[in-house]
Image (tube, rainbow, N blue to C red):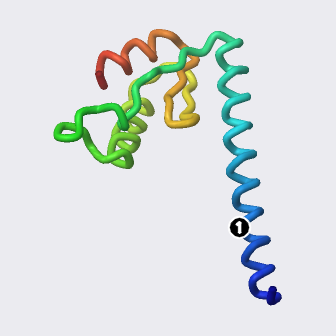
Amino acid sequence: MSKLEHEILDIAAMDIARRMDSELLDTIMIDVLKDEGWTVTTMNPAYEPPLTRLSNGEWYSETAEWIHLNATGDYKLLKGQWLFEKKEDAVMFTLKWS
């Protein structure tokens, strides 16, 4: 195997490890936040009817803007799900985007 092939394999391996670490850290963060009383929403653009939904990127952009303007507590996006510090924000989000 050439040096270039080794370098490409090393880069690919590091990328896979980084993605796995990120997935694990996000899962841990969700568990910690839930233990602290945060509310996890179950809405995800992947489950919306295909003819009426925005693209995933558009959905996340529009929901992020709405949350930024309307949420009264902290919020996070982890693993494609919005989490809210205040249950009221999660309820309003669900009512708006369902």
Q: Which quadrant does the C terminus fall into? A: top left
Residue 20 position in % (x across, y down) = 71, 47
Residue 71 position in % (x across, y down) = 45, 23
Q: Which of 79 and 47 is in front in this view?
A: 47
Residue at screen point 72% across, 77% down? 8
Decide: is 15 above or below 95. Answer: below
Q: Which quadrant does the N terminus fall into? A: bottom right
Q: How many labels does the image show?
A: 1
In the image: residue 31, left or right of residue 70: right
Residue at screen point 75% across, 83% down? 5
Residue 35 position in % (x across, y down) = 70, 12
Q: Nearer the viewer, residue 65 or 8?
A: 8
Q: Which of 76 and 80 is in front in this view?
A: 80
- Residue type at mark 1 is Ala
Q: Nearer the viewer, residue 98 or 51?
A: 51
In the image: residue 78, left or right of residue 56: right
Answer with the quarter of the image where residue 78 lies.
Answer: top right
Numbered disc 1: secondary structure: helix
The residue that mark 1 highlights is 12
In the image: residue 83, left or right of residue 96: right
Residue at screen point 23% across, 33% down? 49
Residue 67 position in % (x across, y down) = 42, 30
Decide: is 60 above or below 48. Answer: below
